[in-house]
């Protein structure tokens, strides 16, 4: 009973082209990502959706696929995402999407990427009606304006508004029925929505309530909707914690001993630390704190210590990689607060150098980086001079 969405992003956006500087509307930026991504992630959040088939303009297919792969790597939507090329008319794009769906797809929802504000509740209403046995389901809204038929500036007829409905997407179908409706309609029959094909076949189309916010970005004045919808950044805090054991000739560890570095700064005369990488406990905690701000997992997932490439790796590289990932996820770091916990060595004489190094690594002014050091009063493993700990807190803003 799998449900797939065919997400239509293959139009040319002619009515908006001038106002958007030639950018096709499905690729306009919304919250730092292409517009179509918004509805893709909404469908991905709906529990019944098995996958999304994104239909791109043939001329943009390669570039759009590449950009989408980057987005998927940074934000796993948790459902299958496939792509295919669209056609000249909207219905040609639907047909291409339909043809590329996996064969076990039972229901298909066809959605305009130009409607980024669709909400999961609306999607749920369409799917529920399909599961209840309706073969074709469309979301509708009552018409508030009076609708007239006009030709050459003259009114020909006035419709009874109470009998009319404005139609939105996603429109849901039994996939076999939609295929049959396309075959029946043939090439000549041009439609502006998919349900028309089913009506043409003489089969019933069921309606569910649409939502007034589910507007289609169509004309230049609709661009204001996107500006209003750009989410404000949210404050975030990331926490990182790391420990390294000191080398002890009496109990050699599994990992090699490394000369101590803190924040990339060598601490001469300090105990050696056991580590696969260069063992910079402070930068490891910092990397985790950066990842924490963007739900990016942890340093071990990104740089497993089973990977020989990271042997004696300068930990500044981990920080830089985490920063890249975090920036891609919309993070701006505003402040970092670091604590080193060790009985030995004494950190005080090195504190300024460590702090400046970290500030430079993060491209932050030194007033935004704090470094503290403490002992644990002879208690625990730091007190026994067996190892060192570091804690990092990173604060910032994240565009969601
Ligand atoms: N669409 C499509 N393939 C086409 C035409 C349209 O996938 N050949 C998609 C659009 O990308 C959009 C949706 O269908 O998400 C609704 O179409 P519309 O609002 O008309 O978009 P465009 O055709 O791109 O815009 P315009 O009509 O102004 O050129
Ligand atoms: Mg169009």
Image (tube, grey):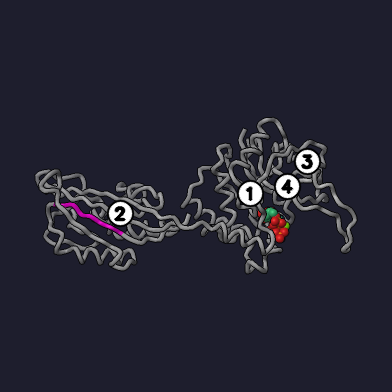
Q: CA distance from mark 1 to mark 3?
A: 19 Å
Please state the quadrant of the image where ligand 1 appears: bottom right
Crowd around label 4: few <14 · some 14–19 · many ≥20 (10 Å): some
- Image quarter where the N terminus lies is top right
User: Magenta residues?
Assistant: 336-342
Any part of residue 86 in sight = no
Q: CA distance from mark 3 to mark 2?
A: 58 Å
Residue that numbered label 4 is attached to = 167
Q: Is-magenta flag for residue 338?
A: yes
Marks 1 and 3, the one that precedes in the sequence: 1
- Foreground: 153 or 50? 153
Residue that numbered label 3 is attached to = 198
Q: Give the left or right position of residue 384, taking residue 193 as reference.
A: left
- Element under label 1? strand
- Element under label 2? strand
Q: CA distance from mark 2 to mark 1?
A: 40 Å
Marks 2 and 4, the one that precedes in the sequence: 4
Disc 2 to disc 4: CB gap under 8 Å: no
Q: CA distance from mark 4 to mark 3?
A: 15 Å
Q: CA distance from mark 1 to mark 4?
A: 17 Å
- Foreground: 190 or 353? 353
Relative image position of residue 267 (x, y in whole percent): 16, 61
Disc 1 to disc 4: CB gap under 8 Å: no
Crowd around label 2: few <14 · some 14–19 · many ≥20 (10 Å): many
Secondary structure mainly formed by the magenta segment: strand
Residue that numbered label 2 is attached to = 393
Q: Give the vertical position of 168 relative to 222 (above or below).
A: above
- Foreground: 334 or 132? 334
Marks 4 and 3, the one that precedes in the sequence: 4
Residue that numbered label 1 is attached to = 7
């Amino acid at each position: 009973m799998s449900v797939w969405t065919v997400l239509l992003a293959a139009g040319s956006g002619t009515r908006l082209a001038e106002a958007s500087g030639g950018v096709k509307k499905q690729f306009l930026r919304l919250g730092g990502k292409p517009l179509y991504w918004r509805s893709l992630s909404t469908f991905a959040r709906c529990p019944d959706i098995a996958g999304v088939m994104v239909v791109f303009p043939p001329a943009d297919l390669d570039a759009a696929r590449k950009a989408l792969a980057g987005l998927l790597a940074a934000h796993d939507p948790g459902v299958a995402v496939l792509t295919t090329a669209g056609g000249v008319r909207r219905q040609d794009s639907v047909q291409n999407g339909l043809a590329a769906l996996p064969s076990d797809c039972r229901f298909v929802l066809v959605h305009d990427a130009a409607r980024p504000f669709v909400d999961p509740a609306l999607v749920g209403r369409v799917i529920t009606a399909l599961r209840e046995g309706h073969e074709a389901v469309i979301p509708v809204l009552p018409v508030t304006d009076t609708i007239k038929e006009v030709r050459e500036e003259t009114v020909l007829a006035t419709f009874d508004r109470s009998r009319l409905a404005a139609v939105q997407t996603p429109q849901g179908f039994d996939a076999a029925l939609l295929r049959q409706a396309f075959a029946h309609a043939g090439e000549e029959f041009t439609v502006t929505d998919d349900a028309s094909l089913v009506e043409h076949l003489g089969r019933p189309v069921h309606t569910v309530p649409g939502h007034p916010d589910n507007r289609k970005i169509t004309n230049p004045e609709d661009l204001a909707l996107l500006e209003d919808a750009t989410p404000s950044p949210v404050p975030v805090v990331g926490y990182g914690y790391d420990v390294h054991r000191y080398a002890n000739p009496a109990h050699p560890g599994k990992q090699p001993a490394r000369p101590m570095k803190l924040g990339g700064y060598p601490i001469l005369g300090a105990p050696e630390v056991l580590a696969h990488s260069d063992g910079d406990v402070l930068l490891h905690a910092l990397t985790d704190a950066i990842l924490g701000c963007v739900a990016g997992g942890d340093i071990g997932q990104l740089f497993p210590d089973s990977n020989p490439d990271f042997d004696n790796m300068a930990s500044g590289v981990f920080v830089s990689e985490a920063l890249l990932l975090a920036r891609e996820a919309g993070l701006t770091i505003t402040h970092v607060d670091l604590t080193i916990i060790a009985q030995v060595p004494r950190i005080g004489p090195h504190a300024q150098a460590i702090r400046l190094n970290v500030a430079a690594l993060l491209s932050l002014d030194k007033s935004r980086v704090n470094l503290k050091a403490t002992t644990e009063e002879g208690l625990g493993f730091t007190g026994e001079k067996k190892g060192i700990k570091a804690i990092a807190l990173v604060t910032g803003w994240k565009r969601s």
